[in-house]
Amino acid sequence: MPRFSVIIPVHRVQAYLHECLESVLEQSFTDVELIAVDDCSPDASGAIIDEFAARDPRVRAVHLAGNVGLGRARNAGLERATGDYVIFLDSDDCLVPEALHAISDRLKKTGGPDVLVYDYVRSYWTGRTLANPVTGHLAETGPPSFTLDDRPGLLRVLHVVWNKAYRREFLVTAGFVFAPGYYEDVSWTYPVLVTAESIAVLDRVCVRYRQRRTGAITCSPGRRHFELFSQYDRVFAYLDTHPGTARWRPLVFRRMLDHFSTVFTAPDRLPRGSRAAFLRQARTYGRRYRALGATPPVRTRVRHALVRLGAHRSYRTLQFAGVLRRRLQAAARAVRHALRGLALQAHYRIQRLLPLRENDAVFCAYWGSGYRCNPAAVEAKVRELAPHVRTAWIADPAHRHTVPPATRLLTPGTAAYWTALARSKYLVNNVNFDRRLVKGRGQVFLQTQHGTPLKRMGLDLIDRPLALGDTDVRRMLANCDKWDFVLSANRHSTLVWERAFPAGYTTLEYGYPRNDVYRNATGEDVARLRESLGIPSDAVAILYAPTHRDHQRTGRHTIDLERMARMLGPGFLVLARTHHLSTIARVGDGSPRLLDVSDHPCVESLCLASDALVTDYSSLMFDYAHLDRPIVVHTGDREVYEAVRGTYFDIRDFPPGAVAGGEDELIDLFATGAWRDPRTARQRAAFRERFCPHDDGRAAERVVRHVFLGETAGTPPGERHQAPAPGPRQEPGPTATLPTGAA
């Protein structure tokens, strides 16, 4: 008897079926049977099922003689299920990695409930993803399992069958089966929830709910959407024949009216000319099943009243009025924004006519995203070495908490912001300020940059349109003309900056101030950072930090991090750091060996806390080399990356450590200890010699003395050392598991 029976009804989904089936079969949790029911699909779906069944004994292919619809196809799978728990999955959706492990673990912790409800994410064909708006009802608080009386809000979670795991014995004993017709989930979900004697929740995304452009029922207009009414007939018939469930009539009634409103207002469901008839029938059902006791908000009560009255024209008028009101509000906001912008620009022009404040300096990093990177290190050193300079930091409201209290806070787009840009003598940024900045006479712009370039930059992207994107080259060069000083970490960077961003600035090859911390941190600092992140003292912490892919709007990591963490075993912990320009979904929920640190405000702290770095083409490798800790480069998509973005040299020819061409090879490097052998140490030493010539912890001091204090004679290099690595730990090698096929 398997732990799970995953039932997948299949009809006209050949384009999505491979991904769906693989999402189940490639789960790390393997105690599962997959029952794929071919609902007499006219495309190649049936053949695809047979192919999977031929190569994996866990797959059972069921072919129905005729098309019976989604509900009855599920029934056919349910009749053949033998697992402890039943999971339904639509054939165009997918389980996320490690979903079955998380579901199984939660079932054990909650004592084997009748139903486990878990989370999902909507995945649109445009690449956009949208979280469940009522995910708060899935919070794992309170008793491990409960009844619906304890959490009636679960009735607000999307009434679908595929966001739950059901104890099969419970389904069989209660005699639950699916009804025919559209919206069959309705007449299943409500009876199941009100009947279950024990329910549990899992606050983890387990399903990727695909929102197709065409082909889905919810975007296919037709009269069959009227079948929604008969599904609610079945729900209320169930409540009538099971007296213990009668108390749920008011809430189900309210949900029914909400559902009617959703279908009525959807632009792509009801055919032309049928909306009045739909609302008239909704009126009949509103009167037939009216139940008092659930009091919604005023706006919802108005909408429900119009549904119960069948007021087609009134409802449409109210809907139109709502749309018109929102558009008028948007237009008014746009006008106010434009007028405010004009007033601020007039204010800025006036401020530019006034004298400079010789001892004022304005700092910013990554377009206002907090106190970070080289500008932060320079600002701190200015307050230490040049206390007469008054510093201000530009930060969006969401990042205000990162700015130290000793520096003045500026919010972008305010009058104080434009005053500071007009009157401050020193302007410091690692990208660029607002394009409307006009550098006045006497102002000094320090461009700190934010990494040693491995990937091509600036004018070197002219012949790479995917990477260049919508960059206005003339505007880019106009911004470069505002720079007075540009920081460089090494000779390689100096040559790249002066070619990729040609302008009349002076290059300061002083090293990057943000890397000073790697020389000045103590062993106590490292231990404190590891403790704050929850890294066990005996674990090897691997920081995974990939770069951005210009050719991807959304996507997944090039490494299956869940699999990597699982294969390496408990001796390792993977810290996943998504690039700030990427929209890759978060990872690691529920996994004790995988931690998503993408929201951590300081990447330098993550580097100090880790034992090794895994990256691809990110400039972080040049910074991490200052620590003299192992670096592993993963080049699994090198050909694509080189074609789209390109690099200044082949990292495989001059690596900072071990190089892995694929995921299995990467796992093997850690499992065998090759990630830190003598050969990689020699490679790292050569890499540091070339790219870290100024790693003495005094880069910020050199910058401040030159730019702010006018000491151009130079600062003698200091003693070169690095922050202590995490303390000795028990070797994790014997606990690691080699992947199948690894070298």
Image: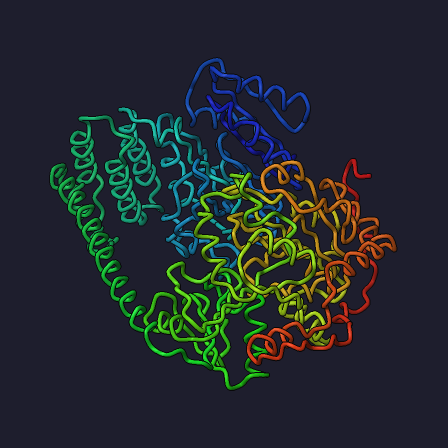
Occupied quadrant, residue 660: top right
Residue 511 position within the rendered picture, expressed as x and y whole percent measured from the top left = 67, 66
Q: Does 397 sit above or below residue 212? A: below
Q: Nearer the viewer, residue 690 or 138?
A: 690
Residue with the most extreme bottom position: 388
Occupied quadrant, residue 421: bottom left
Residue with the most extreme top position: 65
Residue 133 position within the rendered picture, expressed as x and y whole percent measured from the top left = 39, 50
In the rendered view, does 376 fall on the left or right side of 605? left
Q: Residue at x 67, y 39 (%)?
A: 638
Q: Locate the N terminus and report the quarter of the image it occupies.
A: top right
Q: Does 133 sit above or below residue 489? A: above
Q: Nearer the viewer, residue 270 or 234?
A: 270
Query: What colour scheme does the image use?
Result: rainbow
Residue 369 in sight? yes
Residue 506 position within the rendered picture, expressed as x and y whole percent measured from the top left = 58, 65
**Count of picture labels:** 0
Residue 188 position within the rendered picture, expressed as x and y whole percent measured from the top left = 40, 36
Q: Residue at x 70, y 75 (%)?
A: 520
Q: Locate the C terminus and report the quarter of the image it occupies.
A: top right
Q: Nearer the viewer, residue 267 or 164?
A: 267
Q: Does 436 sit above or below residue 256? A: below
Residue 592 in sight? no
Q: Residue at x 26, y 28 (%)?
A: 226
Q: Residue at x 44, y 31 (%)?
A: 177
In the rendered view, does 440 fall on the left or right side of 629? left
In the rendered view, does 533 fall on the left or right side of 323? right
Q: Nearer the viewer, residue 140 or 462?
A: 462
